[in-house]
Amino acid sequence: ECGGTGIINVSRNLTIKIPKGVKEGQKIRLKGEGKPDGYGRKGDLYFIIKFKDSEYTIDGEDLTKTVEITPAEAVLGCKKDISTLHGVINIKIPSETRSGKILRLKDLGLPNKTGGFGVLNIKISINLPKTISLKQKELYKKLLETE
């Protein structure tokens, strides 16, 4: 079975515990779970942590999430329900908010080693609705005339 190498490849499933506060790029070592050397001693198996999330940008224990609002919501201000890792929260977006503005929400990020949590940054993006009625277009024309 070994093809003369003295090593037989065996696949198996392992359950590992990811420690709280782990950072991207950090290594986790499983002692004795690697390939054996020429003398039959097993080496160590290393996992390198990579984060992949389509909803958040991750920077250490801090998260950034983009929230889209309409131009009217940006000018007048609004309240939005935001889904976080800790549940849904309601935030107030102040009037005259510009696209790209960051709202910092403490203790809503990833857990850290000291038992606390990082920051959740809400990045505001102003987008037009997918459909704009004729009445809305007329109002935008009137608005444009005042500028």
Image: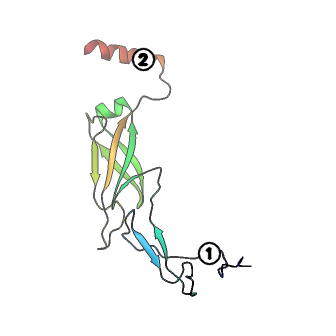
Please tell me which residue is depicted at 32% across the width and 65% down the height of the picture. 117
> Which residue type carries mark 2?
Lys
Q: Say few, some or many: other residues with alpha carbon within 10 Å of mark 2 (under 14 / 14 to 19 / 20 or more).
A: few
Residue that label 2 marks: 137
Q: Is residue 99 above or below residue 140?
A: below
- On the image, the x and y values in percent for residue 81 come to 41, 48
Tell me the distance, in whole angstroms, between the alpha carbons under discs 1 and 2: 59 Å
- Of residues 61 and 88, the one drawn nearer to the viewer in this rendering: 61
Q: Say few, some or many: other residues with alpha carbon within 10 Å of mark 1 (under 14 / 14 to 19 / 20 or more).
A: few
Quadrant hosting residue 6:
bottom right
Mark 1–mark 2 CB contact (< 8 Å): no
For label 2, the SS is helix
- On the image, the x and y values in percent for residue 123 come to 33, 44
- Single out the residue that lies furthest toward the top: 145
The mark total stands at 2
- Of residues 123 and 138, the one drawn nearer to the viewer in this rendering: 123
Of the image marks 1 and 2, the number of the one nearer the N terminus: 1
- On the image, the x and y values in percent for residue 60 come to 33, 60
- Of residues 54 and 134, the one drawn nearer to the viewer in this rendering: 54
Please tell me which residue is depicted at 54% across the width and 87% down the height of the picture. 41
Q: Is residue 127 above or below residue 23?
A: above
Residue that label 1 marks: 13
Quadrant hosting residue 39:
bottom right
- On the image, the x and y values in percent for residue 138 come to 40, 14
Circle nearer the viewer, 1 or 2: 1
- Single out the residue that lies furthest toward the right: 1
